[in-house]
Image (cartoon, rainbow, N blue to C red):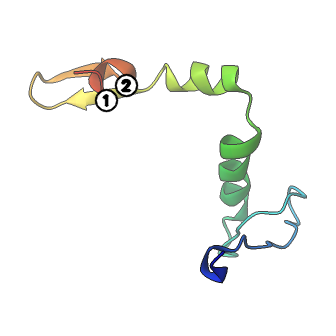
Amino acid sequence: MNSKYKATDYPTCELCGYKHHSYNDGFDYLDCMLYYRTHLEPKEVKEARESQIEIWDAVKKVWVPKKDFYQS
């Protein structure tokens, strides 16, 4: 296997205790939130949050639920 695609071993985060990428820019909690949402958040919670998202349809000039916007 090519070493270019080798998994990176991140240091343990001081805030959350998980190993993930951190920019150390003062907004480290956002890195923790991103890790949580992509790896640890239960599927039911994610679906409930995503179901509330609406996207502006510039052609029809109305707010459309995200699931309906990408189906058309």
Secondary element type, mark 2: helix
Question: Which residue: 26% across, 21% down?
Answer: 63
Residue 13 place in picture, x, y as percent: 85, 65
Residue 54 place in picture, x, y as percent: 37, 25
For this orientation, the residue located farthest to the front is: 1
Real-space Cα separation, disc 2 to disc 1, in angstroms: 6 Å
Question: Which residue: 66% across, 65% down?
Answer: 27
Q: Nearer the viewer, residue 32 or 10?
A: 10
Secondary element type, mark 1: strand
Quadrant of residue 8 within the rendered picture: bottom right
Q: Nearer the viewer, residue 47 or 15?
A: 47
User: As shown in the figure, which amino acid type bears the numbered disc 1?
Assistant: Ile
Q: Is residue 62 above or below residue 18?
A: above
Q: Are marks 2 and 1 in contact (CB under 8 Å)?
A: yes
Q: Is residue 37 left or right of residue 51?
A: right
Q: Quadrant of the C terminus?
A: top left
Question: Which residue: 66% across, 74% down?
Answer: 1
Quadrant of residue 20 within the rendered picture: bottom right
For this orientation, the residue located farthest to the bottom is: 3
Disc 2 target residue: 66
Mark 2 or mark 1, which has the lower sequence index? 1
For residue 55, the mark is 1
